[in-house]
């Protein structure tokens, strides 16, 4: 690692811990930070707790941990896709993952299924969408063509979006349609401890190959010919990266709804801190994405009397930041 990368990652880790502590303190029932630490100590020692422990461990911390998972997963997937396709404007939506997961979830809501089944169907929708994208790319010009793969993702994503619109038309306007609309805007309001435990293994399984193969994934950014010259099986590695990034994205979308901009913006912010090398970019994106999502979720539940959808906030925050990043990059090229 470069000399400055280690300290930056340590600072990002401390930022994440500080955001978690702040988020645990804020809410309708305020808990001082020292009391949060005290409650954590009581839980570790097995001592009995009162109202603070109930609020903290049954309501607030599961939601905070879910926000960390969502932010880290979307940011890691965005960094992986951007390096894989050698395009800084790529996000987890590029292969239709979020839209496919959204389609599965809204179908589950339309059918009146339990929350657990809605999450499973949403996850399955994301995976099926990517399989359809890969199959279409292979049928057109072979799965190794990056441009064809991206265009196939746009087509399948558009079809999934049209199907979501059709489901909204068919939904009960007084009961199902509000639930579908609110879910598509993104929210962690209904997250329970069991949801976090259900999603955690899939996220870890998806992040593990990205972390283990981060050096080889970085080589892909040099181009396919250079990667092959260094002994890398480009097609196999690309398939592993797509599968891993899809797994983490579909897993978290199944519990949070569709949340845009995180996978596009956070890797750019991390790139400013540690540079473009993927072996540095991936851990920085994971830590920064987790901290960013915790901050956005805290703002969503404390800024107004009613909860603000996460997708709305990430768009309001991400749009201006991304414009600033584009302007900064343009000034660099002209100087």
Image (spheres, rainbow, N blue to C red):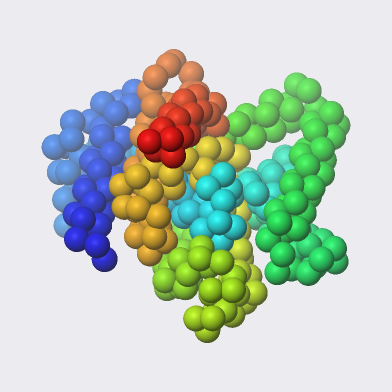
Q: Hey, which residue is sitting farthest front in the picture?
A: 335
Q: Horizontal and vertical percent for residue 109? A: 72, 40
Q: Does residue 131 appear left or right of residue 244 in this picture?
A: right
Q: Hey, which residue is sitting farthest top in the picture?
A: 305
Residue 334 higher or lower than 246, as above or below: above
User: Count of labels shown?
Assistant: 0
Q: Horizontal and vertical percent for residue 35? A: 16, 37
Location of the N terminus by quadrant is bottom left
**The one of 245 and 83 positioned closer to us in this rendering:** 83
Q: Horizontal and vertical percent for residue 194? A: 48, 53
Residue 110 higher or lower than 83, as above or below: above
Residue 133, image quadrant: bottom right
Q: Horizontal and vertical percent for residue 68? A: 39, 47
**Residue displayed at 13% across by 37% down:** 34
**Residue displayed at 23% across by 51% down:** 8
Location of the C terminus by quadrant is top left
Q: Does residue 178 appear left or right of residue 247 in this picture?
A: right
Q: Hey, which residue is sitting farthest bottom in the picture?
A: 231
**Residue displayed at 78% across by 23% down:** 173
Q: Is residue 202 visible?
A: no
**Residue displayed at 61% across by 54% down:** 250
Residue 129, image quadrant: bottom right
Residue 305, image quadrant: top left
Q: Is residue 281 visible?
A: yes
**The one of 155 and 334 positioned closer to us in this rendering:** 334
Q: Does residue 15 appear left or right of residue 122 in this picture?
A: left
**The one of 62 and 129 positioned closer to us in this rendering:** 129
């Amino acid at each position: 690692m470069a000399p400055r990368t280690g300290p930056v990652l340590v600072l990002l880790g401390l930022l994440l811990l500080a955001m978690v502590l702040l988020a645990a303190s804020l809410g309708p029932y305020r808990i001082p930070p020292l009391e949060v630490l005290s409650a954590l100590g009581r839980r570790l020692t097995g001592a009995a707790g009162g109202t603070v422990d109930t609020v903290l461990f049954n309501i607030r911390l599961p939601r905070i941990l879910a926000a960390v998972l969502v932010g880290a997963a979307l940011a890691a997937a965005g960094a992986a896709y951007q390096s894989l396709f050698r395009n800084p404007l790529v996000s987890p939506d590029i292969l239709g993952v979020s839209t496919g997961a959204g389609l599965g979830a809204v179908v589950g809501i339309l059918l009146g299924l339990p929350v657990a089944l809605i999450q499973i169907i949403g996850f399955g929708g994301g995976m099926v969408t990517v399989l359809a994208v890969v199959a279409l790319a292979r049928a057109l010009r072979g799965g190794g063509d990056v441009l064809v793969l991206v265009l196939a993702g746009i087509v399948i994503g558009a079809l999934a979006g049209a199907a979501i619109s059709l489901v909204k038309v068919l939904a009960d306007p007084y009961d199902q349609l509000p639930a579908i609309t609110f879910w598509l805007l993104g929210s962690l309001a209904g997250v329970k401890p069991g949801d976090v435990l259900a999603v955690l293994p899939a996220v870890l399984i998806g992040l593990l190959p990205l972390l283990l193969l981060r050096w080889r994934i970085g080589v892909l950014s040099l181009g396919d010919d250079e990667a092959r010259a260094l002994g890398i099986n480009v097609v196999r590695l690309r398939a592993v990266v797509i599968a891993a990034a899809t797994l983490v994205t579909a897993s978290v979308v199944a519990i949070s709804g569709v949340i845009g901009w995180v996978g596009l913006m956070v890797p750019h912010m991390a790139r400013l801190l540690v540079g473009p090398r993927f072996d540095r970019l991936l851990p920085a994106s994971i830590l920064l994405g987790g901290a960013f999502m915790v901050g956005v979720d805290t703002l969503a539940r404390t800024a107004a009397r009613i909860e603000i959808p996460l997708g709305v906030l990430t768009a309001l925050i991400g749009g201006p930041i991304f414009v600033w990043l584009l302007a900064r990059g343009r000034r660099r090229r002209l100087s």
